[in-house]
Image (cartoon, helix red, strand yellow):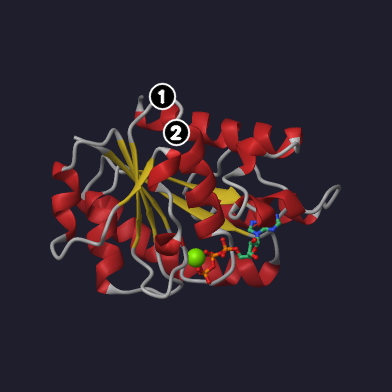
C-alpha cells in the first residue's frame, strides 16, 4: 500500500507544486513514486514525467482507490482553495505537508488549512503533518517570529526549511533540483524528503 503524502495550503503560490515536483524527484531514487495533481488548473499534470521515473497519476473518481496502487509513495499536489475534496484527501493521507512563506499575512492565511487538518487528525489519529517554511530569504529573522506564532497551532514545524532560490523556479523545467548545480538547494530538498520519510517510518 502506498504512503500518501499530500501537499496542501489554501493559499496560492506558497510552493505546493514546486515542492511536490522536487520531492517526487528525490523519492524516485529508490522508491516507486506516483504524482497526482488534483489541481485541475495545475501544471504538473501537463509535464511528461513518466520518462523521468515518476508516474503521473490521473485523479481517480474515487480518491481512496489511490490506496490500491502499487507505488511506494504517492505525492498529491492540491489546488489553492479548501474543499470537501481536500478533507477526503487528508483522510487517505499518511503525511500532510503544509508549505508557508514566513510573513504575518501568511500566518493569518494558514489558519483555515490548520483547522481542516486538525479535524482530519481527529478522525484519523495516525496521520502525521508538518508545516514547512518555504521561500525563506537569507538572514531573515521573521521566520523565527512566525514560528513562534505557529507554536500555538500544535502542528509540527519541519526542521528543514527551504530558502528562496532561483534554482527552485527553474527546477520544474530542468527535471528537478537534483539535476541543478545548486548544492544548497539540493541539500534542502533531500533533507526535507528524509525528514518526511522518518516521520512516516520508511
Ligand atoms: N523556494 C523557492 N524559491 C524561489 N521560488 C520559489 C520557491 N518555491 C516556489 N517558488 C516559485 O514560486 C511560485 C509559486 O510556486 P508554486 O506554483 O509551486 O506554488 P503553488 O502553491 O503550487 O501555487 P498554486 O496554489 O497557485 O498552485 C513559482 O513561480 C515557483 O517557481
Ligand atoms: Mg500549484
The residue under the point 75% across, 36% down is 181
The residue under the point 29% across, 33% down is 72
Q: Quadrant of ligand 1?
A: bottom right
Which of 47/36 is in front?
47
Left or right, 18 with reference to 121: right
Q: Residue 131, image x and y in percent? A: 52, 50
**Mark 2–mark 1 CB contact (< 8 Å):** yes
Left or right, 141 with reference to 38: right
| Label disc, if present, on residue 27 of the rendered structure | 2
Q: Is residue 178 above or below residue 132?
A: above
Q: Is residue 56 above or below residue 70?
A: below
Q: Is residue 164 visible?
A: no
Residue ranking furthest to the front? 51
Which of 94/23 is in front?
23
Residue ranking furthest to the right? 139
Q: Residue 155, image x and y in percent? A: 47, 49
Q: Residue 84, image x and y in percent? A: 25, 72
Amino acid at each position: 500500500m502506498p504512503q500518501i503524502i499530500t501537499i496542501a495550503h489554501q493559499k496560492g503560490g506558497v510552493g505546493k507544486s514546486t515542492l511536490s515536483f522536487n520531492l517526487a524527484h528525490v523519492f524516485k531514487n529508490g522508491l516507486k513514486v506516483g504524482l497526482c495533481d488534483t489541481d485541475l488548473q495545475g501544471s504538473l499534470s501537463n509535464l511528461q514525467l513518466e520518462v523521468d521515473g515518476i508516474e503521473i497519476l490521473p485523479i481517480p473518481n474515487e480518491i481512496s482507490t489511490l490506496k490500491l496502487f502499487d507505488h511506494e509513495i504517492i505525492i498529491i499536489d492540491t489546488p489553492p482553495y479548501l474543499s470537501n475534496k481536500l478533507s477526503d484527501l487528508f483522510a487517505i493521507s499518511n503525511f500532510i505537508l503544509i508549505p508557508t512563506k514566513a510573513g504575518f499575512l501568511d500566518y493569518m492565511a494558514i489558519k483555515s488549512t490548520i483547522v481542516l487538518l486538525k479535524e482530519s487528525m481527529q478522525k484519523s489519529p495516525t496521520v502525521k503533518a508538518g508545516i514547512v517554511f518555504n521561500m525563506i530569504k537569507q538572514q531573515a529573522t521573521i521566520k523565527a517570529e512566525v514560528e513562534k506564532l505557529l507554536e500555538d497551532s500544535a502542528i509540527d514545524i519541519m526542521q528543514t526549511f527551504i530558502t528562496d532560490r532561483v534554482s527552485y523556479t527553474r527546477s520544474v523545467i530542468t527535471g528537478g533540483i537534483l539535476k541543478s548545480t545548486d548544492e544548497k538547494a539540493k541539500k534542502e530538498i533531500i533533507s526535507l524528503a528524509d525528514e518526511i520519510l522518518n516521520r512516516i517510518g520508511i
